[in-house]
Amino acid sequence: ELKHSRVGMLATTGYIVQGSGIHFPGMLSHDVSFESLSGMKPLDAWAAVPDAGKAQILLTIFIAEMISEAKGTHYTKGGSYPTIVFPPIDFSGVNAETMSKKQDSELNNGRLAMIAIMSFIAANNIPGSVPALIGNPAF
């Protein structure tokens, strides 16, 4: 659940940033610019990414998953939770009670992010399905 929460937070943030028109400078490929993608809805922008670019993204995700899943005892079998922090932060000096509260907050925020990204996808694919997003140009 923690890994999915983190992915949900990244996806929600990415959808909002792309939907706001924020983009990298330059070209994604020889015929697709980041600026042209930022003018589209997020799911339309994904469809406009060249197939080779999509393959690179999916391959990178696959490799990251293989590496994280192959480390020692899996977290669902009593191993430690996956840590994805760049740069790595030393939490050894943090009070255990404070750390537990912060981890609970991360999980709760991740749960909300998973609901948010699914709402964004529903609003994009089914007009009017999310009343709070009606009329928003990103959907």
Image: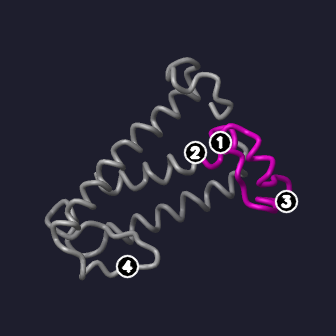
Work out whether 67 lies above or below 11.
below
Work out whether 91 lies above or below 58.
below
**Dot in front, 1 or 3:** 1
Q: Which mark is residue 30?
A: 3
Circles 1 and 3: CB atoms closer than 8 Å: no
Q: What residue type is labelled 1?
A: Gly
User: Residue 35 colored magenta?
Assistant: yes
Question: What residue do we see at 52% from left, 34% from top?
Answer: 120
From the top left corner, tell me how far across and down residue 57 is, in percent: 58, 59
Q: Which amino acid does label 2 sit on?
A: Tyr
* Magenta highlight range: 16-45
From the top left corner, tell me how far across and down residue 28 is, in percent: 76, 59
Q: What residue type is labelled 3?
A: His
**How far apart are the two marked residues, 2 and 1, measured between alpha carbons?**
6 Å
- Counting residues from the start of the chain, the first of labels 1 and 3 encountered is 1
Question: What residue do we see at 57% from left, 50% from top?
Answer: 14
- Counting residues from the start of the chain, the first of labels 3 and 4 encountered is 3
Toward the top, the furthest residue is 128
